Image: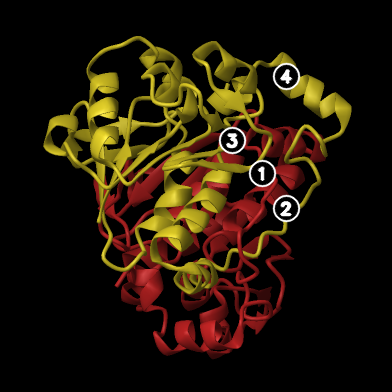
Chain colours: A yellow, B red
């Protein structure tokens, strides 16, 4: 089973590394990080680069496609080689997945039309522009399309998908290996739970915190 | 405020990327990934490389030191240049931190002697070998030393530390930006909650799942 993780400039690193830690540990999985060019890809805050080991053309038929978000996503909404690759890879994939605003890339490529999906809470309103129904859940499974909410939701998605692929006990073993027993220090991870002034602050910054500004 | 994130071959990527996503977004923070050599550093499963942008010698006096774990940690337990850098960086740091078995590196370098700390649940028994008291908490703060349990605990640690550095409201805003409202699909993230056969499986593999084998 080949897992293709898409990289592009100014993606959010945790969007890919969260699900990667779960999915890459599924027995029989081979993971490859792909980009428009091989080499280091600088993430959103700018101080971390992940390496693309293959070009899009070199990974034409993955079993699992994983698309991250991050503010670099806004530069890839127009049709072009990246959308063409997404459509071609999706045509043969078993699972097509996204984290955070990666769902907007899948949507813009036409892959989520008429489907149920989610994305970062600041971007949920954009899904309707592409004919996608937003569902207010942390991970949404609609057929082979699995979309996760913002950034850290990718780890929940990765473990859920590991269970669908390899069985729940394998997923549980991976979860225990990753010691994923989360204890957030604050009740602030969702606009439902965060104090209203914090929600307004983050909303007014229009996601600039996600860009590390 | 300069944050130095240590990279070494076969580290676990999430150990650094979790806390990085929180700490690098603290206003005024500059994050640098450091290694024995500049360039790509291959993580434990082998399919992801993170880039070291600076050598140890180029980052002699960071304000925050972050040390990850992963099976590569076992190759760095003997004294040498890496331990020398840890001791020198720690001498001037405001915070010295670890995730997962990174605590064993801090301990082996002599920085946790007589202190309270934690590490990955499979490795807690090793802390006593270095005169360190294990505390069964997800994040342990003892003076300026902040240690986190296995892998995914780094995100909890990063947010807690962001609050200590920049105030709790800033940490809450970062948490909301990262949409960190975790919903693990299984109750299996700790040996306390995972089914006993799963705990025995992971224990018998002696952490090989963490190595992606």
Which mark, by number, is residue B51? none
Q: Are marks 2 and 3 on the same chain?
A: yes
Subunit ID for the residue under disc 2: A
* Nearest to the observer: residue A154 or residue B169: A154
The chain to which mark 3 is attached is: A
Q: Which residue is mark 4?
A: A203
Give the residue pinned by disc 2: A184
Cα distance between the residues tagged 2 and 3: 15 Å
Residue A212 visible? The answer is: no
- Tell me the element at label 4: helix
Callouts 2 and 1 close, C-beta under 8 Å? yes
Q: Chain of mark 4?
A: A
Q: Which residue is mark 3?
A: A150
Of residues B72 and B208, the one drawn nearer to the viewer in this rendering: B208
Q: Please identify the quarter of the rendering in which residue B98 is found.
A: bottom right
Query: Which structural element holds mark 1?
Result: loop
Q: Cα distance, mark 2 to mark 1?
A: 8 Å
Q: Is residue B121 left or right of residue A199?
A: left
- Where disc 2 sits, the SS reads loop
Q: CA distance from mark 1 to mark 4?
A: 16 Å
Residue A52 percent location from the top left of the image: 24, 38
Determine which residue is flagged by label 1: B180
First-in-chain label (4 vs 2): 2
Q: Earlier in the sequence, mark 3 or mark 4?
A: 3
Q: CA distance from mark 3 to mark 1?
A: 8 Å
Residues behind callouts 2 and 1 on a single chain: no
The answer to whether B108 is drawn above or below residue A155 in the figure is below
Q: Give the side of residue A185 with respect to residue A159, left or right.
A: right
């Amino acid at each position: 089973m080949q897992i293709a993780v898409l990289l592009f400039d100014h993606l959010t690193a945790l969007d890919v590394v969260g699900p990667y830690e779960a999915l890459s540990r599924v027995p029989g999985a081979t993971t490859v990080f792909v980009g428009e060019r091989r080499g280091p890809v600088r993430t959103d805050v700018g101080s971390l680069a992940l390496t693309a080991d293959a070009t899009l053309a070199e990974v034409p038929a993955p079993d699992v496609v994983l698309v991250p978000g991050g503010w670099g996503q806004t530069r890839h909404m127009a049709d072009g080689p990246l959308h063409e690759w997404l459509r071609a890879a999706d045509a043969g994939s078993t699972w097509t997945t996204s984290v955070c605003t990666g769902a907007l890339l899948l949507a813009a490529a036409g892959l989520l039309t008429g489907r149920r999906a989610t994305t970062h809470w600041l971007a949920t309103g954009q899904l309707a522009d592409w004919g996608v129904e937003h569902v207010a859940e942390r991970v949404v499974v609609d057929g082979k399309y699995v979309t996760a909410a913002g950034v850290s939701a990718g780890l929940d998605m990765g473990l859920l998908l590991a269970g669908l692929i390899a069985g729940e006990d394998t997923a549980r073993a991976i979860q225990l290996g990753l010691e994923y027993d989360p204890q957030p220090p604050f009740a602030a991870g969702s606009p439902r739970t965060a104090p209203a002034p914090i929600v307004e602050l983050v909303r007014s910054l229009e996601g600039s915190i996600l860009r590390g500004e």
